[in-house]
Amino acid sequence: MRRMKKRWAMLLPTVLLLALTFSTTVLAAEEEAEYVPALHATFWALVPPIVAIGLALITKEVYSSLFVGILMGGLLYSGGQFELTITHIFQDGIIGVLSDSYNVGILVFLVILGAMVSLMNKAGGSAAFGQFAASKIKNRVGAQLATILLGVLIFIDDYFNCLTVGSVMRPVTDKFKVSRAKLAYLIDATAAPVCIIAPISSWAAAVTGFVEGEDGFSIFIRAIPYNFYAILTIVMMVGMVLLKTEFGKMKVHEQNAERGDLYTTPGRPYENVKAEKISTKGGVMDLLIPIIALIICCVIGMIYTGGFFDGADFVTAFSNSDASLGLTLGSFFGLIITIVLYQIRRVLSFKECMDCIPEGFRAMVPAILILTFAWTLKAMTDSLGADLYVAGLVESSAGAFLNFLPAIIFVVGCLLAFATGTSWGTFGILIPIVVAVFQNNNPDLMIISISACMAGAVCGDHCSPISDTTIMASAGAQCEHVNHVTTQLPYAVLAAAISFVTYIVAGFVQKAWIAMPVGILLMLIVLLVIRDMNGKRKEL
């Protein structure tokens, strides 16, 4: 009997402890599950990014505008409660996004890439390539076309594209008096728009992951001819360079650049940067070898994360890759190869190489800060149910406007990506809806609509001042961020308008070989009209 009492005496506290733990967990879970913002999944979910974007365009100040948008999101989420607002902004927002392994990987990649850019500049590789390119390029048109070509060739990832093209081509475009705003546009227009039509890219891997129940990679390939915004953006960019015509605020920037002012506005954050000591031993190979090594290492890093070395084929490995981890690993080994190369060639001392790492970090601080705020703003919109609100809009319009649906989806994708600043998040919201709507009744319209999702997401991302790609393009060109946004916006809107018309055509004919020529023809006609209008104004 005593033994039984002793056992119960030992067992009872354990049982009570487990019961208390279980009840606490259940109550906490219920408490957490019970709280839903009063404005959840309503139009108010899109108000914080709209406020942030509006303030940025009005005040020309990015950091405070983004924080006001974040604060607005926190207030809408909490219903005005002070404590919940603060904890949501910092715990769920800033700390939450900086605790995400994917986001941290992107930040590490940016820091390493900044260090590599600093190394290549200090070694004299960038300067040597600039001199080489300048000897081959004879005018402004050649400088811009060379920038476009390099941007198209670096199709693996948009971040990698932005910073690499900017660091390599900036000395060349400066020599031929191409404005920093135009350089930023050329970088941005060859980043996401090229990645989204490149089968071997981090973007292709992201898109295929969102197509559940289907062969994502084959759908991505079939959707490429219908990605009208990406293709028309490239056509427009090359056409405007060859026709030597500009419009909107970009025209003012280009005219001032021809007179020697590359910045136009009082905000010239990179103009007075202290020139660092550059090695005179550096050559063109000190730029090309690190970039080629970086490309190869990033590809290997991405297929490694996708299981290539565990037996998966190349395409499957790239489709299943983790872009953040792959780019981080690739850039790390690219940095090691660059440092070893410079030691062998005795271009820089080991101490000089190590000094470039914090220098590269410092150069990336503005971009990292804006990215952190942009990610936090997206966390606010997610917590307010922006994805559910947009999904409801798309599903409600599916039956009534079937042939117009690709055009409608394109517009919704534009608005969602513009408001949230993320293409990949827009893919994740819209593509599963499209697959569910068309999967069993109209496969051709499903392909067109998936492409419209991708095109709209890229367009909105291209326009948005809180987009990470837009931020990276500004950093790569060393252009004031608001200058880049305001000069690029009219160009992106023009390409979007023509893409919208083309998607209407595609929704009815459902043939890429008919719809695409219509879009390209419309774009060329508009460019010729703009050139003629500019010519008439000059005569006046």
Image: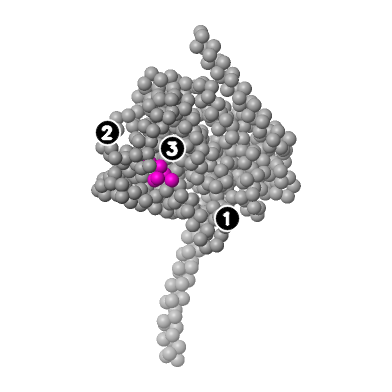
| Residue type, label 3 | Val
| Residue type, label 2 | Lys
Disc 2: CA contacts within 10 A as few (<14), some (14-19) or many (>=20): few
Callout in the foreground (3, 2): 3
Q: What residue is pinned by disc 3?
A: 165
Disc 3: CA contacts within 10 A as few (<14), some (14-19) or many (>=20): many
Spatial CA span between label 2 and label 1: 47 Å
Percent x, y of residue 236: 56, 28
* Residue in the foreground of this view, choosing between 443 and 329: 329
Q: Range of the magenta residues?
A: 287-292
Tell whether position 189 is magenta: no
Q: Residue at x 44, y 85 (%)?
A: 7
Numbered circle sitting on residue 215: none
Spatial CA span between label 1 and label 3: 28 Å
Q: Secondary structure at mark 3?
A: helix
**Between discs 2 and 1, the one toward the N terminus:** 2
